[in-house]
Amino acid sequence: MTHVITSLCVRDRGCIEVCPVECIVPGQPAEGWSMMYIDPDTCIDCGACVPECPFAAIFPEDEVPAVYTAKGGEYINKAGLTGHYEGTNHHNKAVVLETTRQLAAGEVVDLTPDIKVNNDFFKSGPGYAAKDNDQGT
Ligand code: SF4
């Protein structure tokens, strides 16, 4: 099994620092790969990244919610969305995303498609090569 970063991720990056096997990679270019991604072949399921995420975006693969009920105000972040987000990451660097949508309280979202997105990032997307283009945001 593996852990999965879902589209509740808005690039805090704290998870990257605690992963003991360095299998979390920041998506680049961010317009197309807007989150952090976990390599399912390397993740050892230690769970260390889960409490590090201030957006509660990381789940064990078999617990990724098919029915995620929004608290209200959190952002979904994925290619194809067009909403603007501004925040600050773990390193106090500004994060600006144009691939988001803010959720309304009680809105229900299926986060399970993000399992494939994490896989695709490493199987057919930039994978670990994205680290070479990392801008720190
Ligand atoms: Fe890394 Fe552990 Fe998170 Fe897997 S569960 S991505 S090994 S910190």
Image: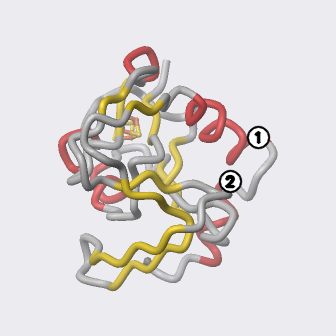
User: In what quadrant does ligand 1 lie?
Assistant: top left
Q: Residues within 10 Å of mark 1 (few under 14, many from 20)?
A: few
Q: Residue furthest right?
A: 124
Q: Amino acid at mark 1?
A: Lys
For the point 68% across and 53% down, the residue is: 127
When the figure is inspected, residue 48 is found, relative to residue 17, above or below; the finding is above
Q: How is the image coloured?
A: secondary structure
Q: Which residue is mark 2?
A: 127
In the image, residue 88 lies at what x, y percent? Answer: 27, 77
| Horizontal arrangement in the rendering, residue 133 relative to residue 12 (left or right) | right
Q: Count the labels in the image.
A: 2
**Residue in the foreground of this view, choosing between 47 and 112:** 112
When the figure is inspected, residue 51 is found, relative to residue 36, above or below; the finding is above
User: Dot 1: what SS?
Assistant: helix
Whether residues under marks 2 and 1 lie with C-beta atoms below 8 angstroms apart, the answer is yes
Instruction: State the mark number for residue 123.
Output: 1
Q: Amino acid at mark 2?
A: Gly
| Horizontal arrangement in the rendering, residue 119 relative to residue 44 (left or right) | right
The image quadrant that residue 70 belongs to is: top left
Mark-to-mark CA distance, 2 and 1: 7 Å
When the figure is inspected, residue 90 is found, relative to residue 55, above or below; the finding is below
